[in-house]
Image: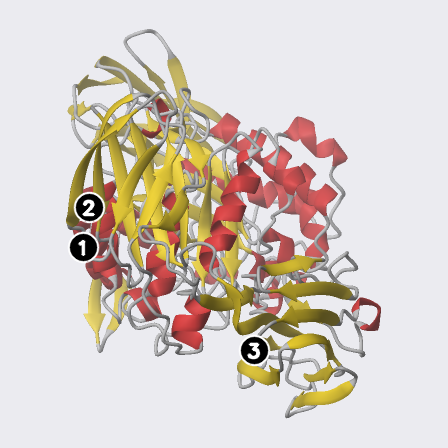
Amino acid sequence: MKSGCPLSFALLCGLLLTSSVGHSQSSAASPLVTPYAQKGRLEIHGVSLSAPTLPRFSRLDATVDLSATFDNPFDPADIALDARVTAPSGKTVTVPGFLYRPFQRELKDGREVLTSAEAPSWRVRFAPAELGEHSLVVHVKDRSGTAQSKSVQFTVTASASPGFARVSRRDPRYFDFDNGHSFFPIGANVCWAYNRGTFDYDEWFGRYAESGCNFGRLWLSPNWTTFALERAGKRADGLGMGQFDLGNAWRIDRVLELATERGLYLKLCIDSYNILRQRDGYPQWDNTPHNAVHGGPLQRPTDFWTDSAMDKFYRDKLRYLVARYGAFTHVFAWEFWNEVDITTGYKTEPARAWHERMARELRALDPWQHLITTSFANTPGDPVIDRLPEMDYMQTHHYGSADLCATIAKANAQKAAFGKPHYIGEIGADAGGPREKDDPKGYQVHDAIWVSTVTGGAGCAQSWWWDNLIHPKNLYPLFPPLAKFIKDIDWPAENFRTNSPRVEWQARPDPLPRQDLFLERGPTSWEKSEFNQPRRVQVTRTGATGQLPLAGLQHGLGGHRDKHNPVTFETDLPWATRFEVIVGDVSGYGGAKLKALLDGAVALEKDFADPDGGDNTRTLKQYAGAYGIEIPAGKHTLVVENMGADWFMASYRFRDAIEAARPPVLAWGLVGSKTALAWARVEGRTWQHVCALKENVPPAPPTVLTLSGLAAGCWQVEVWDTWTGEIRDRQEVAVSASGEAQVKLPQLEHDAAVRWRRQ
């Protein structure tokens, strides 16, 4: 199962808003006593700046020397330090301050060790957007009263920095920077490291940057991750709710500084579902400081959404995040949650109200107005939360499709109706693991980044398996060809429309060859639906008709008896065919049993037994494969069903069953005003067939790809090798008023990309 994430076909209100929030059984009214507590007369002794002059959008650090009386420096009700910065225009912004402690790192026996000989101190960080002379005044409030510093000045000069990432005003489906330059994220998840800690990022970020990538993602929870801010433990050690791990906070600083050097923009994922999950799928509820067992405010996970004490803790965390990391232009976005919909007891309405409440709080705190998002485990997401105006953009997480490309294209098409940027935030062929032995070339990475780019994504699909596939298999070379292919595209300026290119034979064969009929894994659901009931499909020489698509799950007769969904195939073919059920994962809650009846007689039985009888509920992988029977020519009735206790994943195939009326090539495309993009792949070369089933899928013959919707005029067409980044062919095409253009594609072993440029 993917680390930190369960099977997914695959954390945040002002006081005026808390009146609708329930009351906790534990009280957070009194400040926590922390190891950073101080007693002294309130006084600001001085403010020193990291530089008197700095370039626009770069980071200014102001160190504040003060004495005060407080117990918890992370609680603004106990002590609050803010800076008011006045720009040359007269505009004044308020920036929260934070407690900081410097660390040094070293590797000891392969493990990162942090040490610090300095006491914590107070800092303010600011990234200026205006040129000219600014003034900064620090204000502090503790339980004894208020104080303010003398004004200090600094000057801002011009720079080449593009500023912060925004939703484009020119086309809200894409991203821009403050300077108007477009931004298309290319990269992968890089959520945590292992023993080497930030030393891993020295290597990873170097490799990604050299490969043309510009994007990544960090997790700031659960407690075991490299960058966990909230960790269970003794309050005297600086742990528990209401305090933040200053060592891990320094690690985030370090990695953000490295990302800035390397030109990478990072999405900071504040919390992951694990902290509110009680069983299965990497639960961390028993270990989280939020739990009352560890001194937190929550008796049960669902209290998170309405507990007033929890709201206070969360607002304090948002303040600290903005204070410490908001001035980094390379913080691309705040992501409230990783896969919030699989927290224990998840319900849309309390989660919606919480996202709305905390997003408004974050907006009020953040002077730089970073992008805000959240994510879901289930591929469709939660439309109610996705549609919130407080959510700037959307993501899709997906694992396990028989053909990832079809699912990615579908997800981009569905989310386009929301009118916001959308990209695939996590993608993998198997939620259970990277399958690195099956996929050493990284087809699940390669195909995902290409198809997502040409089907309307605001960024390329982000692979989950950064640490146990991309890095160990050295798959970084997969990214430079895409980075070169889309270089210099101004995405919001193009007014891109998705397009389905037509693919035809260069030389139509006679007679037409036969090809397999694939009925790839369809919708997967454990709820009652039209797919989780008996279905009927007709198969002839021209293809399949009937109740399509078929469900991706065959439900058994145990706990899901009301969803039992046998499939009846009525075949009428002039030739014999071999029929196969392609089985993927099998339920760990008792297994399953495949049965097939051909013309009423049992033709196939296969027991997918659960070795431990369901005691260990881990998904069963050992039964994956193709199970088949021979079907003679003529009319026949085939019934396929699951007679076991629970579910198995299924696709279906009829070998050499249908006439190939078109070439075995699939294509996806985008058409803009000056640029058009397309990607074509051999139809049968899905991850499942090539990597999982180890099938030898033959190449596709030379074809003609026709794109429509182009502006009339002269276009330069380039055919690209997506593995090397080389241009294999250049053509000049005159597009008439019909808006169609054709380009010849060579024989395809796997795929090719095409770029049109209007001259």
Q: Are marks 2 and 3 in contact (CB under 8 Å)?
A: no
Which of the numbered marks, if any, corresponds to residue 577? 3
Q: Quadrant of residue 152?
A: top left
Gap in angstroms between the C-alphas marked 1 and 3: 52 Å
Q: Of residues 523 and 744, which is closer to you in this image?
A: 744
Q: Are marks 1 and 2 in contact (CB under 8 Å)?
A: yes
Q: What is the residue that sits farthest to the right in this orientation?
A: 562
Which of the numbered marks, if any, corresponds to residue 206? 1
How many C-alpha atoms fall within 10 Å of the one at disc 1: few (<14), some, or many (≥20)?
some
> Which amino acid, mark 1?
Gly
Q: What is the residue that sits farthest to the bottom in this orientation?
A: 611
- Closer to the chain start, of discs 2 and 3, is 2
Which label sits in the foreground, 2 or 3?
3
The residue wearing badge 2 is 262
Going 37% across and 71% down the picture, which residue do you hit?
A: 697
- Closer to the chain start, of discs 1 and 3, is 1
> Could you tell whether 298 is left or right of 462 in the image?
right
Q: Is residue 89 visible?
A: yes
> Which amino acid, mark 2?
Arg
Percent position of residue 251, x then y: 31, 54
Gap in angstroms between the C-alphas marked 1 and 2: 7 Å
Q: Of residues 173 and 716, which is closer to you in this image?
A: 716
What kind of element bears circle 2?
helix
How many C-alpha atoms fall within 10 Å of the one at disc 2: few (<14), some, or many (≥20)?
some
